[in-house]
């Protein structure tokens, strides 16, 4: 089956299902690049009369991820993402292609553009300390890891936390799954570094039993933010209003 062009399909879907929409945007890989045969249409709809929700469906041969929002809900999820240093919601709106005529949604799009341009900001001292501690602890585990399920798990987590720390140290957004790798590639393109390729290659070696290259990259990342941190690390517990641990009796 031949599928229609992504923009054509997205516009028809929005017109059919959301006639009262103020604006809608098509984002994701089909717009930003890197799309594959299984890529879906990421469509964000601004419609104050609709119930805020996300939905997965198929339309004219395309898998579709549909995000239906009001301005208030977009702002809410942008704030949630910002707390995790991820640009997911803001990017869908700020970098998506407008699907409806007119300037509807201009205010919330500008808000999202401003959030993207400002970046995630620096890590707090507590968050940075926690990140340094976690990666330092992993490097010790990695050194003694043997090939197999446990060694692979340690190597993958070391790769992930190293990538996160590199991005944070450089004031960049982070992501999950493929978006973490894409954020690294963006950093490399902008800064002339080679973190994405080096981490990819060292992860493969670590899974096969040679952990030294990945250990070195983790130490390189730690060196950018003050080095390893283990002895002397302390984190205060987060207590409830009555001084009890969350979820306690």
Image (cartoon, helix red, strand yellow):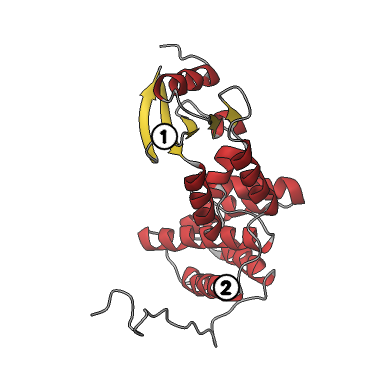
Q: Which residue is outermost to the top?
A: 2
Q: Which residue is outermost to the bottom?
A: 232
Between 121 and 204, the one nearer to me in the picture:
121
Q: Residue at x 55, y 71 (%)?
A: 127
Q: Quadrant of residue 28?
A: top right
Q: Residue at x 55, y 39 (%)?
A: 92
Q: Residue at x 69, y 60 (%)?
A: 170
Quadrant of the rendering where the C terminus is positioned: bottom left
Residue 73 appears left or right of 225: left
Residue 113 appears left or right of 84: right
Q: Can residue 232 be seen here?
A: yes
Q: Residue 134, percent across and down?
A: 50, 72
Between 240 and 40, the one nearer to me in the picture:
240
Numbered mark located on residue 132 in the image = 2
Q: Can residue 192 be seen here?
A: no
Q: Residue 17, percent across and down?
A: 40, 23
Q: Residue at x 54, y 74 (%)?
A: 136
Residue 172 appears left or right of 99: right
Numbered mark located on residue 49 in the image = 1
Q: Residue 236, percent across and down?
A: 47, 83
Q: Quadrant of residue 1?
A: top left
Mark nearest the camera among 1 and 2 is 1
Q: Residue 156, percent across and down?
A: 47, 57
Q: Which residue is outermost to the left?
A: 249
Residue 37 to residue 160: above or below: above
């Amino acid at each position: 089956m031949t599928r229609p062009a992504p923009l054509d399909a997205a516009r028809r879907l929005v017109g059919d299902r959301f006639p009262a929409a103020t604006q809608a945007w098509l984002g994701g890989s089909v717009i930003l690049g890197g799309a594959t045969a299984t890529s879906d249409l990421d469509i964000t709809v601004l419609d104050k009369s609709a119930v805020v929700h996300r939905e997965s469906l198929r339309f004219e041969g395309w898998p579709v991820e549909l995000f239906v929002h009001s301005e208030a809900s977009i702002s809410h999820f942008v704030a949630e993402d910002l707390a995790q240093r991820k640009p997911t919601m803001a990017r869908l709106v700020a970098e998506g292609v407008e699907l409806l005529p007119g300037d509807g949604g201009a205010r919330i799009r500008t808000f999202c553009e401003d959030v993207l341009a400002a970046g995630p900001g620096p890590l707090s001292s507590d968050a940075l300390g926690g990140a340094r501690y976690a990666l330092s602890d992993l490097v010790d585990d990695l050194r003694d890891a043997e090939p197999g399920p446990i060694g692979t798990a340690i190597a993958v987590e070391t790769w992930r936390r190293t990538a996160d720390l590199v991005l944070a140290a450089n004031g960049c957004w982070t992501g999950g799954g493929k978006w973490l790798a894409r954020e690294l590639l963006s950093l490399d393109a902008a800064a002339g570094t080679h973190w994405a390729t080096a981490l990819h290659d060292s992860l493969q070696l670590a899974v096969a039993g040679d952990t030294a290259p990945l250990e070195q990259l983790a130490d390189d990342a730690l060196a950018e933010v003050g080095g390893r941190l283990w002895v002397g690390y302390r984190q205060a517990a987060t207590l409830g209003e009555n001084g009890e641990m969350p979820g306690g009796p």
